[in-house]
């Protein structure tokens, strides 16, 4: 009886792990990779998943740190942005076929790669510029999101090591928000709340974080 119980338990555990692996493999994912040597950041990757678990990696500068932090920055975009990203991917036929314009006379704006994965797709395309409106839209969304996430990386570093430096970046973010050049603030809403709630941060910086937080998701 004891052996039967152990075998039954092992079987159920194996079945559970197999189901979990299958669910993970079938989770729809859009990934955006950007490479442009000489820019800051010169490389970054954004991974947006249908289940709400999103990740960002970058080699962008972090304050006075001499070595970029490549630790994935975890975030979650707003439902609206997530829906737009996956709608664009669908309209762009999940990045199959011709994506790059093929116009070699255009200025190089960085190598961009879009990847789509789910239970029945594993497709990708690399381009400099695309004529496809859906690819253009998703590129704008994800590049704007990268701008927000770079601030998120820097604010995280400053909040931990150099709190007086927070205000400059928060001020820049407010200016970008007014000029509509900042992406989905919902992605860093938890971080903005941490800064706003931290009594050791300058009052002006906390006020800026609160104003930005009020705009998150809108």
Image (spheres, rainbow, N blue to C red):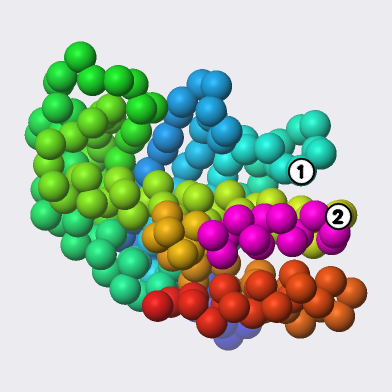
Quarter of the rendering occupied by the C terminus: bottom left
Badge 1, how many Cα within 10 Å: few under 14, some, many 20+?
some
Q: In this view, does 26 lie above or below 143?
A: below
Between 94 and 216, the one nearer to me in the picture: 216
Q: What stretch is highlighted in magenta?
A: 163-175
Q: In this view, does 11 lie above or below 85?
A: below
Coordinates of residue 84 in the picture (x, y in percent): 25, 64
Residue ID for mark 1: 63
What is the number of the mark on residue 162? 2
User: Is 113 a magenta residue?
Assistant: no
Residue 159 appears anywhere in the view: yes
Res. 118 image quadrant: bottom left
Q: How many labels does the image show?
A: 2
Local secondary structure at mark 2? loop
Between 50 and 155, the one nearer to me in the picture: 155
Badge 2, how many Cα within 10 Å: few under 14, some, many 20+?
few
Coordinates of residue 70 in the picture (x, y in percent): 66, 41
The reply to whether discs 1 and 2 touch (Cβ–Cβ < 8 Å) is: yes
Residue at (69%, 51%) from the top-left corner?
154
Residue at (48%, 49%) from the top-left corner?
146
Coordinates of residue 181 in the picture (x, y in percent): 42, 55
Q: Is residue 80 left or right of residue 150?
A: left
Q: In this view, does 31 lie above or below 176?
A: above
Res. 136 image quadrant: top left
């Amino acid at each position: 009886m004891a052996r039967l119980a152990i075998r039954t338990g092992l079987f159920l555990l194996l079945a559970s792990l197999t189901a979990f692996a299958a669910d993970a493999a079938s989770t729809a994912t859009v990934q955006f990779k950007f490479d442009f040597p000489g820019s800051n950041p010169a490389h970054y990757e954004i991974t947006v998943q249908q289940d709400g678990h999103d990740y960002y990696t970058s080699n962008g500068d972090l304050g006075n740190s001499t070595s970029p932090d490549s630790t994935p920055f975890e975030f979650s975009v707003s439902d609206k942005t997530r829906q737009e990203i996956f709608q664009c991917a669908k309209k762009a036929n999940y990045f199959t076929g011709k994506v790059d314009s093929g116009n070699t006379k255009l200025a190089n704006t960085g190598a961009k790669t879009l990847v789509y994965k789910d239970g029945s797709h594993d497709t990708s395309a690399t381009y400099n510029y695309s004529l496809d409106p859906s690819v253009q839209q998703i590129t704008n969304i994800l590049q704007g999101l990268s701008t927000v996430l770079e601030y998120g990386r820097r604010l995280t570093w400053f909040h931990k090591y150099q709190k007086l430096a927070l205000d400059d970046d928060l001020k820049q973010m407010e200016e970008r928000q007014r000029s509509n050049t900042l992406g989905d603030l919902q992605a860093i809403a938890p971080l903005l709340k941490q800064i706003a709630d931290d009594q050791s941060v300058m009052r002006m910086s906390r006020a800026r974080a609160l104003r930005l937080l009020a705009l998150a998701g809108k």
